[in-house]
Image (spheres, rainbow, N blue to C red):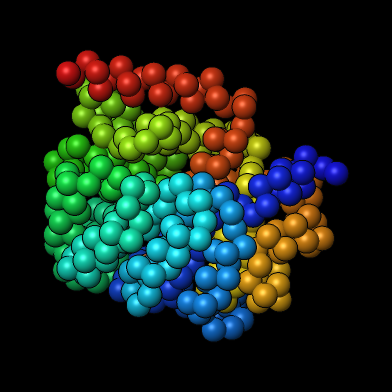
Amino acid sequence: MRVDDTLSRLAGTPPYLILFVSGKCWMHCSHCWFHDVWKAEHHHGEPLTTAEIEKIARSMHRVSFLSLTGGEAFLRDDIVEVAGMFGRLTRLERYDIPTSGYEPDLVHGKVREMLRVNPGIPFRVGISLDGTREIHDSIRGVRGSFDRTLETIELLREVKRKCRNFDMGIITTVSKHNQEHVRSIGTLVEEIFPEGEWQVNFIRGDPRDPEAADISVENFELAHRMIADRIERGCFGGHDFGFLGPWLSAKNSLRRKVILEHVRKRRAGVRCAAGTLGGVVYLDGGTYPCELLQESMGNLRDYDCDLSRLWNSKRASEVRKMIRRNRCFCTQECFLTVSILSSPSKWPSLIRERFILRRARSSLK
Ligand code: SF4
Ligand code: SF4
């Protein structure tokens, strides 16, 4: 049996799971790959019901990391129930929800409910901020979204102050439409959220506006340098809850370097763990190794929503084999996370980044 099949079998189900729970969204972002054309081509059925998601959760034992996403996950009516289900039925170690933060009261209310149903489980919300007011509103295609996002950030900062297992990060997707403004975005993020983490993502997939993907790596690198500078000055927070928390921030530092390596050298700087330790389940139960490959591993509805059976099926093994054969590499941040954390060759660099973060913070005390 090949190493990746052995690992998948040992894990049983992907320890790192991205679960799409909503196809709805308030925004119309130019960099978005999860747009109507993509959905029409890829979704072949109704969204998974609450009962079906419960079956998926029951088929999983340990979930190291769960991302509840969409679209806008907070627009799913039973989102609190879904989060609670994983907290109750699996050994859920950490979960997160990315959001545009467009509805401050709704997001704030649901976050508080989730913290109630999953007490003590590390939970992070990643809020997207793509520019200063005019740029953000123009990229997001919704006037007024910048001000509302800032309101959500303020509300969640307050939650973060009160609740140890809650964390928030600000995420900027670098695209053609904001790449020239990376410096002002970084300065803004530091102003409005000095105690937190700024995460920059490289635009990916086939965006709604194809031109949005036309970016220069130097602009991404500038964001990387600004973050490194903040770390050096001790003005950079990040994951800090539990044993794993600080390692995740170290991983984010290393991940930016791996992304730069992938873009510049056009070769894999780490062995991809998608399809082995990480996977994606779309709204209709379609299961994939990641969000970029079009190779389906099957649909959960054909397995009575038993992810363990699907994950260890012949088809899933074929997809893993194809990933190995093609020596696939990309800049997809989520899968770089699981790839970096599970690659022993990356651990010395990870320890170095952890040391840098720790030294920077303690120098401030
Ligand atoms: S990028 Fe996210 S917030 Fe923007 S339209 Fe797509 S799903 Fe919605
Ligand atoms: S390298 Fe990227 S595209 Fe290839 S399998 Fe991994 S996450 Fe998917």
- Residue 287, visible in the rendered structure: yes
Q: Residue at x 33, y 61 (%)?
A: 117
Q: Nearer the viewer, residue 26 or 344?
A: 344
Image x and y of residue 63, in percent: 53, 51
Q: Residue at x 66, y 37 (%)?
A: 271
Q: Nearer the viewer, residue 109 or 225?
A: 109
- Is 75 left or right of 195, judged from the image as shown? right
State the quadrant of the C terminus. top left
- Is 269 left or right of 358, judged from the image as shown? right
State the quadrant of the N terminus. top right
Q: Residue at x 52, y 71 (%)?
A: 53
* Picture quadrant where residue 248 is located: top left
- Residue 219, visible in the rendered structure: no
Task: Please tell me whether residue 314 is drawn above or below residue 184 in the rendered image.
Answer: below
Q: Residue at x 57, y 64 (%)?
A: 58
Q: Nearer the viewer, residue 17 or 242?
A: 242
Image x and y of residue 350, in percent: 49, 25
Q: Residue furthest bottom?
A: 46
Image x and y of residue 143, in percent: 19, 71
Q: Nearer the viewer, residue 200 or 350?
A: 350
Task: Please tell me whether residue 345 is drawn above or below residue 11 in the rendered image.
Answer: above
Task: Please tell me whether residue 254 is drawn above or below residue 334 in the rendered image.
Answer: above
Labels in figure, total = 0
- Is 255 left or right of 126, judged from the image as shown? right
Task: Please tell me whether residue 39 is drawn above or below residue 331 in the rendered image.
Answer: below
Image x and y of residue 11, in percent: 66, 47
